[in-house]
């Protein structure tokens, strides 16, 4: 540690590491894991908790190409067709594959790594989504499976209208019959109960009272579903079927229902997202990485090379020094990129973001049009180092990863998680190589 002047006055001791990752989303977590497994002393700092709790838990590499008629079958084969500024083109197909191998090792409860092809999964809205990796809890719900499906919704969970979702799936010409029913979840859970409350009750197989009789909740839930079954081979529930004992919950329900059980990915708050967050943080622990959340990076020292950053803690600005830095703070939604009426900017290091001078050129009139703002982000060189307006490297020891990068529309492409994992992996790996 080195004593340095503090911007708030006095002298502070800089907290040192080989690599400092800024941002706690999936890009930051992947960068930290890649650097730690490569032998670097790495620390992650994040202002907010991971955004994975707001994600479906599905991991997309590339679902759609611009102007395509349907979903991408093999996302790796489609990468060469992307524009040269796309993050996948910058890191290369081989790096994307290596990054997904790292993810597969860290998230052992995920499926899809056996093939390069996308899987097709039903969503809670009744659409079919192409995705590269999916939780084991969703695996019996694949749209390519021809077994008939009964979707089960709970009265208190209005985010999942099972009959409507079933109707939409049927209209999508899936290769199976599908129906939806809504039942009351057994017990006395409040109408506004959190998804974790359902999960905890099912994890422990807690006791619920049904018609004046105490029953284990898994048994009671199965008994409420059984009268609605008409020979379906699969039953889909909202994604609340346990947390620590999710596999045991599904097995118990499947045995009592005589059908495979799967979870339908839901919107936030997302239990599959929370499970994935736990798995990744467990992997960081095992790799010896250090991490802390709740404190923002508010400034830095350096010109052409970052010397240290300042993290605000209880009104004080604490210096953190490293040899290499990774910026993984998110995009416009995650506040890694800020905007005003006449400017879009990266708030920590002031990294350049190309944008039309005319604000009205930032978007199209059509809500689903080709919006310029969707591709706003930091431009980077072949090593993911941010570049300035003249395409020169802004900081020699800074790399960018995830949705803070520009050059792609993750919402339209269904590529957000994949880009975050691929660029996070590349940034962490390359940073560790420099300090080795």
Image: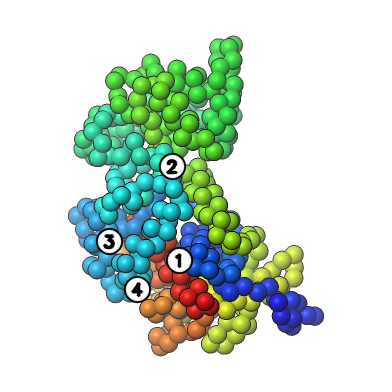
Image coordinates for residue 94, horizontal then vertical, percent: 32, 67
Contact, mark 3 vs mark 1 (Cβ under 8 Å): no
Ranked by sequence position, the earlier of labels 4 and 3 is 3
**Mark 4, residue position:** 90
Q: CA distance from mark 1 to mark 2?
A: 25 Å
Q: Quadrant of the N terminus?
A: bottom right
Where disc 3 sits, the SS reads helix
Q: CA distance from mark 2 to mark 3?
A: 26 Å
Q: CA distance from mark 4 to mark 2?
A: 32 Å
Ranked by sequence position, the earlier of labels 2 and 3 is 3
Left or right: 46 as drawn, with respect to 38: right
Where disc 2 sits, the SS reads loop
Left or right: 126 as drawn, with respect to 301: left
Contact, mark 4 vs mark 2 (Cβ under 8 Å): no
Q: CA distance from mark 3 to mark 1?
A: 17 Å
**Mark 2, residue position:** 266
Looking at the image, which is closer to me, 316 or 222?
222
Where disc 1 sits, the SS reads helix
Where is 432 relative to 199, above or below? below
**Mark 3, residue position:** 76
Ranked by sequence position, the earlier of labels 4 and 2 is 4
Residue 262 in sight here: yes
Image coordinates for residue 399, horizontal then vertical, percent: 48, 75
Residue 347 in sight here: no
Ranked by sequence position, the earlier of labels 1 and 2 is 2
Where disc 4 sits, the SS reads helix
């Amino acid at each position: 540690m080195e004593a340095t002047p503090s911007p708030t006055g006095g002298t502070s001791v800089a907290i040192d590491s080989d690599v400092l990752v800024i941002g706690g989303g999936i890009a930051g977590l992947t960068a930290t894991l890649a650097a730690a497994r490569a032998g670097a002393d790495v620390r992650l700092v994040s202002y907010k908790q991971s955004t994975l709790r707001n994600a479906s838990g599905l991991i997309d590499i590339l679902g759609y190409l611009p102007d395509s008629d349907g979903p991408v079958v093999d996302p790796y084969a489609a990468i060469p067709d992307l524009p040269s500024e796309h993050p996948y083109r910058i890191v290369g197909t081989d790096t994307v594959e290596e990054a997904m191998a790292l993810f597969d090792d860290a998230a052992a409860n995920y499926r899809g790594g056996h093939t390069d092809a996308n899987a097709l999964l039903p969503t809670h809205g009744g659409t079919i989504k192409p995705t590269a990796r999916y939780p084991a809890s969703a695996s019996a719900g694949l749209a390519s499976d021809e077994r008939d499906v009964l979707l089960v919704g709970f009265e208190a969970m209005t985010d999942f209208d099972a009959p409507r979702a079933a109707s939409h799936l049927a209209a999508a010409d899936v290769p199976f019959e599908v129906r939806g029913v809504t039942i009351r979840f057994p017990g006395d859970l409040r109408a506004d109960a959190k998804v974790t409350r359902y999960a905890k009750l099912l994890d422990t197989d807690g006791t619920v009272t049904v018609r004046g009789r105490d029953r284990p909740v898994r048994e009671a839930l199965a008994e409420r579903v059984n009268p609605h079954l008409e020979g379906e081979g699969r039953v889909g529930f909202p994604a609340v079927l346990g947390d620590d004992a999710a596999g045991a919950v599904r097995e118990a329900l499947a045995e009592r229902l005589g059908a495979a059980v799967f979870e339908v990915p839901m919107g936030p708050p997302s239990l599959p997202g929370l499970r994935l967050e736990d798995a990744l943080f467990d992997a960081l622990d095992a790799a010896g990485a250090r991490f802390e959340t709740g404190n923002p990076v508010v400034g830095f020292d350096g010109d052409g090379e970052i010397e240290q950053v300042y993290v605000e803690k209880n009104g004080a600005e604490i210096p953190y020094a490293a040899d290499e830095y990774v910026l993984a703070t998110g995009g416009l939604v995650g506040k890694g990129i800020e905007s005003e009426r006449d400017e879009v900017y990266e708030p920590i290091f002031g990294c350049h973001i190309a944008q039309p001078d005319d604000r009205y050129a930032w978007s199209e009139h059509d809500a689903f049009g080709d919006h310029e703002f969707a591709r706003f982000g930091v431009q980077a060189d072949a090593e993911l180092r941010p570049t300035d307006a003249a395409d020169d490297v802004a900081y020699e020891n800074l790399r960018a990863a995830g949705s803070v990068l520009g050059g792609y529309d993750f919402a339209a492409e269904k590529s957000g998680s994949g880009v975050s994992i691929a660029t996070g992996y590349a940034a962490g790996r390359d940073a560790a190589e420099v300090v080795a």
